[in-house]
Image (cartoon, helix red, strand yellow):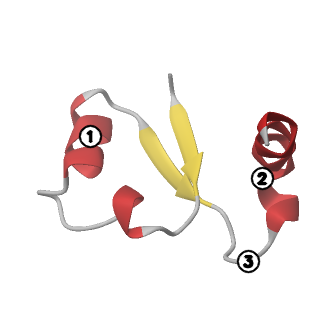
Amino acid sequence: MECTYSDNGREYQGTSEHLFVKTCYSHRINQKFTQSACPQTNEKVERVIRTLN
């Protein structure tokens, strides 16, 4: 995996000691963040969530 896209939730951000941040860094995965309250920026994920619900 080269890159992960996530929303701006606390579980995906933080200091360099945050578990998710450390994991991405150690595996050379770039973190990119979508715009808040804008499901169009991550429409594929939103579609999967809608299907699962």
Q: Earlier in the sequence, mark 2 or mark 1?
A: 1
Bin the neighbour count of mark 3 within 10 Å (Cα to Cα): few under 14, some 14-19, many 20 and up. few
Q: CA distance from mark 3 to mark 1?
A: 26 Å
Q: Earlier in the sequence, mark 3 or mark 1?
A: 1
Q: Which mark is residue 52?
A: none
In the picture of the structure, the residue carrying the numbered disc 3 is 37
In the picture of the structure, the residue carrying the numbered disc 2 is 42
SS under mark 2:
helix
> Taking 36 as reference, is 2 left or right?
left
- Labelled pair 2, 1 in contact (Cβ < 8 Å): no
Looking at the image, how many numbered discs can be counted on the residues? 3
What's the residue type where badge 3 is placed?
Answer: Ala
Q: Residue at x 52, y 69 (%)?
A: 8
Q: CA distance from mark 2 to mark 3?
A: 10 Å
Q: Residue at x 47, y 67 (%)?
A: 9
Q: Position of residue 3 (x, y in %)?
A: 53, 36
Residue projecting furthest to the left = 17
What's the residue type where badge 1 is placed?
Answer: Tyr
- Labelled pair 3, 1 in contact (Cβ < 8 Å): no
SS under mark 3:
loop
In the picture of the structure, the residue carrying the numbered disc 1 is 25
What's the residue type where badge 2 is placed?
Answer: Asn
Residue projecting furthest to the front = 53
